[in-house]
Amino acid sequence: MVGTIDRYVRISLPALQGIRLYHVFSDLDQSIATPAMAADQVPTGYTEWAGDWDGSPVSVGWDWAVVGGAIVLINPLEIRTNIAILSPQGASESPMRTRLHLQEWIEGLNWHAPIENILPRR
């Protein structure tokens, strides 16, 4: 259910697996790169996804980089979302634990194709 004050969608970890996200947009953004990434000309960017859970809209966005030829999520603490994960006892997990759960969930999604489509050909 959606919180009345903070607008977070509270969802249990098992229920998170049932959310189906759709790609909203992705783009290149070299300002995300660390100095080492920038020096190596590592492509970086961001991606935004949306979906629905129990009638409430959810959104998730994260930054990515191409590292060693693989597209990877960088810095799980920078995941942007309106999802709050509930503990088994029904309390909201901390924002850090929520983002760590989301990172694991995101890694199980098929999110790389939209990124591949915007990468410069090498």
Image (cartoon, grey):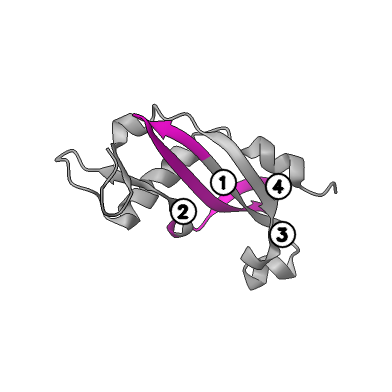
Mark closer to the observer (4, 1): 1
Label 1 is placed on what type of residue?
Glu
Of the residues under marks 4 and 1, which one precedes in the sequence? Answer: 1
In the rendered image, which residue does mark 1 sit on? Answer: 48
Residue 62 belongs to magenta span = yes
Numbered range of the magenta stretch: 50-77
Circles 2 and 1: CB atoms closer than 8 Å = yes
Label 3 is placed on what type of residue?
Val
Q: Residue furthest left?
A: 89
Residue 34 belongs to magenta span = no
Q: Position of residue 22 (x, y in %)?
A: 56, 33
How busy is the neighbourhood of tag 1: few (under 14 within 10 Å), some, or many (20 plus)? many
Picture quadrant of residue 115 = top right
Q: Is residue 68 above or below residue 117?
A: below
- Residue at the spot 47% in from the left edge and 53% down from the top edge: 79
Taking 67 as reference, is 7 left or right?
left
Q: Is residue 5 above or below residue 23?
A: below
Disc number for residue 69: 4
Q: Residue furthest right?
A: 122
In the rendered image, which residue does mark 3 sit on? Answer: 42
How busy is the neighbourhood of tag 3: few (under 14 within 10 Å), some, or many (20 plus)? some
Give whichever of 71, 82 is nearer the camera: 82
Label 4 is placed on what type of residue?
Gly
Q: Secondary structure at mark 1?
A: strand
Q: Secondary structure at mark 2?
A: strand
Disc number for residue 80: 2
Of the residues under marks 2 and 3, which one precedes in the sequence? Answer: 3
Of the residues under marks 3 and 4, which one precedes in the sequence? Answer: 3
Label 2 is placed on what type of residue?
Arg
Residue 33 visible from this viewpoint = no
Mark closer to the observer (3, 1): 1
Q: CA distance from mark 2 to mark 4?
A: 25 Å
